């Protein structure tokens, strides 16, 4: 028998959406996407925070990504679900609650933020893969795969922030490490998901937002984001044919 999502799942979705919305608005009120002189040196390689590029709705690309993510999760929680969806519910709730907290810790407690972002990523990936059986058959929820794709990029963006601002890594090196890990993980996950392409769609969408937001401040970051898009697109075509 089909049933609607539990109150805990609905509450986790609402908390996740409200948290990201409020955090994005707070970034718009106190922007720190790039140094003050970034716009004075276009096409340079200034320090820039990928987390802010994803979470601050400053571009139509980032704003539309967040809107689709929030609406998809809300629909998933409110619609009547098959009993087979139950294995994904626990990890989904954990992932959403972790996702509601970590952005607020980024500036003052980056290590804790990274730990929560990692928990969010692992939990949402588990939820997305819950529909697949051990023999590789079955089908993942497109909504959960989309959320896992967003979480992959957001988690790796938080890793880049820690490498850059906490450990002192050069901005382009931090970005290169995080985008390389995101790309390798995404290729592996997409091949497991097969024809459920929403995972890679979310990643590509987020990378476009990063490339567009970084174009004036860091041409190197924008170029790496475009390269990651190309690699993920190849894996997407391979998995869907």
Image (cartoon, rainbow, N blue to C red):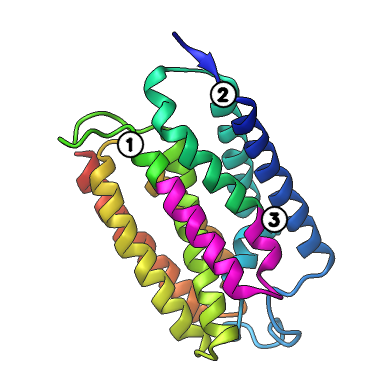
Instruction: Identify the residue position indicated by label 1 in the image.
Output: 196
- Mark 1 residue element: loop
The answer to whether one can see residue 207 in this image is no
CA neighbours of label 3 inside 10 A, class few (<14), some (14 to 19), many (20+): many
| Pointer 1 with pointer 3, Cβ within 8 A | no
When asked about the image quadrant of residue 12, the answer is top right
Q: Is residue 147 magenta?
A: no
In depth, the one of 153 and 211 nearer the eye is: 153
Question: Quadrant location of the N terminus?
Answer: top left
Q: Is residue 124 left or right of residue 113?
A: left
Residue 219: % across, % down:
51, 79
Kindly report the distance in space between the C-alpha atoms of the residues bearing marks 3 and 2.
Answer: 28 Å
The residue depicted at 80 percent of the width and 61 percent of the height is: 26
Q: Is residue 47 above or below residue 188?
A: below
Q: Quadrant of residue 41?
A: bottom right
In this view of the protein, which residue sits in the foreground, 142 or 206? 142
Q: In the rendered view, does 34 fall on the left or right side of 87?
A: right
Q: Nearer the viewer, residue 109 or 233?
A: 109
Q: Which mark is residue 5?
A: 2
Q: Which labelled disc corresponds to residue 57?
A: 3
Rendered residue at 77%/70% (across/down): 31
Position above or below: 26 against 40: above
Is 107 part of what is drawn in magenta? Answer: yes
Q: Residue at x 68, y 79 (%)?
A: 34
User: What span is colored magenta in the figure?
Assistant: 101-125
Q: Residues within 10 Å of mark 1 (few under 14, many from 20)?
A: many
Residue 133: % across, % down: 23, 33
């Amino acid at each position: 028998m089909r049933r609607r999502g539990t109150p805990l799942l609905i509450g986790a979705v609402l908390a996740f959406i409200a948290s990201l919305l409020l955090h994005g608005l707070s970034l718009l009120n106190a922007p720190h996407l790039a140094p003050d002189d970034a716009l004075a040196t276009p096409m340079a390689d200034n320090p820039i925070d990928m987390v802010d590029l994803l979470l601050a709705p400053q571009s139509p690309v980032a704003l539309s990504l967040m809107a689709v993510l929030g609406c998809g999760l809300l629909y998933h929680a409110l619609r009547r679900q098959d009993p087979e969806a139950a294995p994904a519910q626990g990890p989904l709730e954990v992932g959403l609650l972790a996702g509601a907290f970590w952005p607020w810790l980024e500036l003052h407690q980056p290590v804790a933020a990274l730990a929560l972002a990692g928990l969010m990523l692992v939990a949402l990936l588990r939820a997305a893969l819950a529909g697949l059986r051990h023999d590789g058959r079955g089908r993942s929820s497109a909504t959960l795969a989309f959320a896992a794709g967003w979480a992959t990029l957001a988690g790796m963006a938080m890793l880049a922030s820690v490498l850059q601002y906490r450990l002192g890594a050069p901005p382009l090196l931090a970005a290169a490490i995080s985008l390389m890990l995101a790309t390798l993980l995404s290729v592996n996950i997409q091949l497991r998901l097969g024809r459920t392409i929403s995972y890679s769609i979310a990643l590509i969408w987020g990378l476009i937002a990063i490339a567009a937001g970084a174009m004036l401040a860091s041409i190197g970051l924008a170029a790496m984001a475009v390269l990651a898009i190309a690699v993920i697109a190849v894996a997407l075509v391979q998995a869907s044919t």
